[in-house]
Amino acid sequence: MLQLSNSLIDRPVLSLRTGGHIATTVSAIFNPNNLKIEGFYCSDRFEKRTTVLLTQEIRDIIAQGFVVNDHESLTDPEELVRLKEILAINFELIGKPVYTVSKEKLGKINDYAADSETLYVQKLYVGPSLLKSLSSGQLSIDRTQIVEITNKKIVVQDLMQMTKSALPMTASPMGS
């Protein structure tokens, strides 16, 4: 099932051991190489510091928040040697400009949807610029349409290619 960003951010982290709220997710940690959410920065409720909740520590995602075993599931960012490079990049998805291969600006990412099982980002929702928003609405881009991801922008297939790739394989365009 796909989860929008607002169902992942600013959510309680709940402990199975104590049955209580131990932290709150603040922001997602994205791996820009594959758009996987590797974890979440969290505001620790008891120690008043920023910790990291790794995705492998999440037992379940429920309506009330993220379920983990206990407070030990939260890790200090300095201890995450394998994620050191990803944490240093500090890749942010919301607000990232989106361009086509032919360099047409489509707008900026204003939301995303991630698979709740794998936490891979599956869809990007792009809001057009102010002028274009008067004539068109939000654009949904599937992860298969992404060509390149950099720290400054995301490049996707041209709109005409996106339309053609959305057609079923057995259908012939224009009835020919």
Image: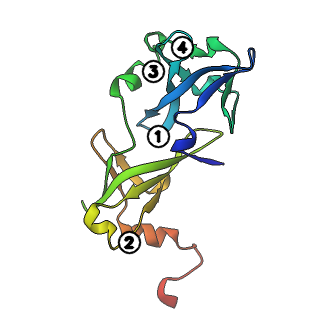
Label 4, secondary structure: give it. strand
Label 2, secondary structure: give it. helix
Residue placed under numbered mark 2 in the picture: 160
On the image, the x and y values in percent for residue 111 come to 45, 49
Of label 4 and label 2, which has the lower sequence position?
A: 4
- Tell me, yes or no, if residue 101 can be seen here: no
Amino acid at pointer 2:
Met
Q: How far apart are marks 2 and 1 (CA)?
A: 24 Å
Residue placed under numbered mark 4 in the picture: 75
Of label 2 and label 3, which has the lower sequence position?
A: 3
Front position among marks 4 and 3: 4
Residue placed under numbered mark 3 in the picture: 83
Of label 1 and label 4, which has the lower sequence position?
A: 1
The residue under the point 56% across, 11% down is 46
Amino acid at pointer 4:
Thr
Please, is residue 33 above or below residue 97 in the view? Answer: above
The residue under the point 51% across, 69% down is 166
Q: In this view, does 161 lie to the left or right of 170?
A: left
Q: How crowded is mark 4: few (under 14 residues within 10 Å), some or many (20 or more)?
A: some
Label ID, residue 35: 1
